[in-house]
Image: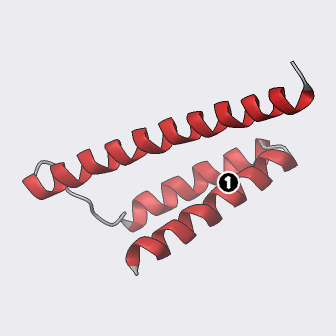
Amino acid sequence: MSDDTSASLGSRVAAARHDREHAAREAKLDRIREQVAEGKLVVREMSEAERARWASQHAASDARATPAERARRAREIENRRRRAERLAS
């Protein structure tokens, strides 16, 4: 197999995996929307006590994280923020 062919195959496999993951995520979100619409699931804001508990857990986790893990988490948080903005508009 030539390098071009193997690179092309690799990118197709990665794209297919990405498509499957995206479809699975969308299916989960659809299920959540259905449950909310049926009244079986309630989405609410966190209480101040919950926020404080999660903040302390995140701080402990960050203290153990490597710089690469911290950077990955920061990217994930930024991606979530952008996604939320897109969905809100």
Looking at this view, name the residue that lies furthest to the left: 38
Q: Nearer the viewer, residue 32 or 4?
A: 4
In this rendered view, identify the residue nearer to me: 10 or 72. Answer: 10
In the image, taking residue 24 as reference, residue 39 lies left or right, namely left
Residue name at image x 57 percent, y 35 percent: 16
Kindly identify the residue that appears in the image at 12 percent across and 58 percent down: 37
Residue 30 at x, y = what percent?
27, 50
> Where, quadrant-wise, is the C terminus in this rendering?
bottom left
Quadrant including the N terminus: top right
- Whole-percent x and y of residue 54? 52, 54
> In the orientation shown, which residue stands out farthest toward the right?
3
Q: Position of residue 24 (x, y in %)?
A: 41, 38
Q: Would you name the residue on which mark 1 appears?
A: 59
- Amino acid type of the residue that numbered disc 1 sits on in the rendered structure: Ala
Q: Horizontal and vertical percent for residue 66?
A: 84, 43
Hey, which residue is sitting farthest top in the picture?
1
Q: What residue is drawn where x is 65% and y is 30%?
A: 13
Q: Nearer the viewer, residue 85 or 61?
A: 85
Q: How many marks?
A: 1
Question: Which element is circle 1 on?
Answer: helix
Q: Residue at x 42, y 42 (%)?
A: 23
Which sits in the foreground, 41 or 82? 82
Query: Left or right: 60 with respect to 38?
Result: right
